[in-house]
Image (cartoon, rainbow, N blue to C red):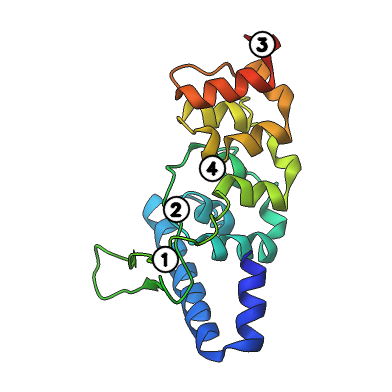
Amino acid sequence: FGQDVLETTMHTDAIAFVHVADAWTKTLLMLKAMHELKKEKTFLELHTAAAMDCPRALLKAMTIVYHNQLLQKDEFGRTPLLVAAEAPVYKSHDFSTQGQYHMHDDDDDVLMQTTTTTNNNMEEEPSVLEIILQACPQAAKMRDAKGRLPLRVALEAGKTWTDGLEQVFVAHTHALDEAVPRGNDLNTIFELLRSHPVLF
């Protein structure tokens, strides 16, 4: 998705490409600023983006540019998928003409904002978890420093079936052996039960 956006705008719409390029530059600056605020030792662009309200198109592009980071662990033993699994779920941003994505730095308290999307027929974007898994399915089998798999981390963080939990489960179904859902929404529990009834 992100690669398609960048390639299309490069060849068909110079003005649109300027908007995307500008968003890309400001996103990287913001990621660096967030990294400095957290005072973490090593700056990993993809890990930082996975934890933030980053436009899905740009995140997809980042999985291509920073592909070497997809299985790399940060100082807390987390891959980008593990970071996304425990991060909040942010609303997707529309890059279309009906809902241009805007970034600005004229307000210290607001680095990113969006206008309301008016296109109700817009195709639903993939979740952050799905984007990362599309780029690196084997990340679903990588454990964090506590020995937890992404599925367990996502369930403990309250992720739902439609938040990308389905893709995490499909990528490594045996992970459910170690992660029985507790307190998750009924639809998520139902889908897991239907997919793997032997565990319940």
Q: Position of residue 175 (x, y in %)?
A: 68, 24
Near-viewer residue (58 or 78): 58
Quadrant where the N terminus lies?
bottom right
Residue indicated by mark 4: 83
Tag 2: amino acid: Met
Residue 165 seen by the camera: yes
Which residue is tagged 3?
199
Residue occupied by mark 2: 52
- Comparing labels 3 and 1, the label whose residue is closer to the camera: 3
Q: At label 3, which amino acid type do we have?
A: Leu
Q: Measuring 57% from the left and 16% from the top, which residue is drawn there?
A: 180
Question: CB of mark 3 within 8 Å of CB of mark 4?
Answer: no
Question: Which residue is located at x 43 percent, y 66 percent?
Answer: 119
User: Viewer-proximal residue, 23 or 167?
Assistant: 167
Q: Secondary structure at mark 4?
A: helix
Disc 1: which residue: 30
> As shown in the figure, which amino acid type bears the numbered disc 4?
Val
